[in-house]
Image: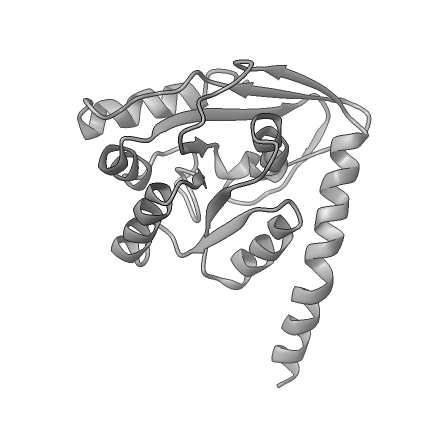
């Protein structure tokens, strides 16, 4: 019971604190967008590595003045925390992963895209291996015809956690470099070709 109470309190307080922290880090950094000026109105799949996802809501806001997106999030407790945090940025979630409950999650994501939502996904999430592209993003893009925008977020000053994804937290008073690709169409690619293209695109500015 004590565990349930502490989790409930964490779910109430931590997402608000997290959202305020993300906002502060964004506002206290200079921003450089190395990206197309605009993207199509159609539903898009936005992809970035799990370790870079903290500041992703602001890249999305750069393109969509009104948020209309759902993000694939782990169904674990840490996923619930992330889900509640990104609600402060107007983003919905699809709980699960393309590792566990893969079929259910893919069906829900495909349905969501067909309903007109953008999708946010970490191709190496929720548990890795780091910088390896799982099949899910490719399958949902090919089943719906949705284009993919590959996103890299590179702060000049940052903390890097010792987690599997080397999760990156920008420090204040540096510069956030946002890189976004042109829209990528994988509909005519084989699975392996698409995997290589996505992986190389997401590692373009890796140091």
Q: Residue drawn 62% across and 17% down?
A: 33
Q: Residue drawn 56% across and 38% down?
A: 53
Tell me how many marks there are.
Answer: 0
Q: Quadrant of residue 58?
A: top right
- The image shows residue 66 at horizontal and vertical percentages of 59, 37
- The image shows residue 26 at horizontal and vertical percentages of 74, 32
Task: Name the one closer to the observer, 186 or 43.
Answer: 43
Q: Can you see residue 171?
A: no
Residue lying farthest bottom?
Answer: 1
**Quarter of the figure with the C terminus:** top right
| 35 with respect to 130 (left or right) | right
Q: Residue drawn 48% across and 46% down?
A: 70
Asked if 113 appears above or below 14 in the picture, the reply is above
Task: Name the one closer to the observer, 104 or 2.
Answer: 104
Asked if 181 appears above or below 162 in the picture, the reply is above
Q: Can you see residue 85?
A: yes
Asked if 33 appears above or below 122 in the picture, the reply is above
Give the color scheme: rainbow, by chain, secondary structure or one colour: one colour
Asked if 55 appears above or below 83 in the picture, the reply is above
**Quarter of the figure with the N terminus:** bottom right
Q: Residue drawn 54% across and 63% down?
A: 77
- The image shows residue 73 at horizontal and vertical percentages of 47, 51
């Amino acid at each position: 019971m004590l565990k349930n109470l502490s989790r409930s309190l964490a779910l109430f307080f931590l997402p608000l604190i997290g959202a305020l922290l993300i906002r502060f880090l964004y506002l206290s950094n200079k921003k450089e967008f190395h990206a197309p000026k605009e993207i199509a109105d159609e539903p898009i799949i936005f992809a970035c590595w799990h370790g870079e996802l903290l500041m992703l809501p602001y890249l999305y806001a750069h393109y969509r003045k009104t948020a209309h997106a759902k993000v694939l999030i782990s169904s674990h407790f840490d996923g619930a925390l992330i889900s509640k945090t990104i609600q402060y940025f107007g983003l919905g979630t699809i709980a699960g992963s393309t590792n566990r409950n893969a079929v259910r999650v893919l069906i829900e994501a495909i349905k969501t895209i067909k309903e007109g939502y953008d999708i946010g996904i970490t191709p190496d999430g929720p548990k890795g291996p780091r910088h390896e592209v799982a099949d899910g993003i490719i399958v949902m893009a090919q089943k719906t015809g949705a284009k993919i925008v590959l996103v890299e977020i590179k702060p000049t000053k940052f903390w890097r956690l010792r987690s599997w994804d080397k999760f990156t937290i920008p420090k204040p008073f540096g510069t956030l470099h946002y890189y976004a690709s042109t829209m990528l169409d994988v509909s005519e690619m084989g699975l392996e070709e698409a995997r290589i293209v996505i992986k190389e695109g997401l590692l373009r500015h890796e140091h």
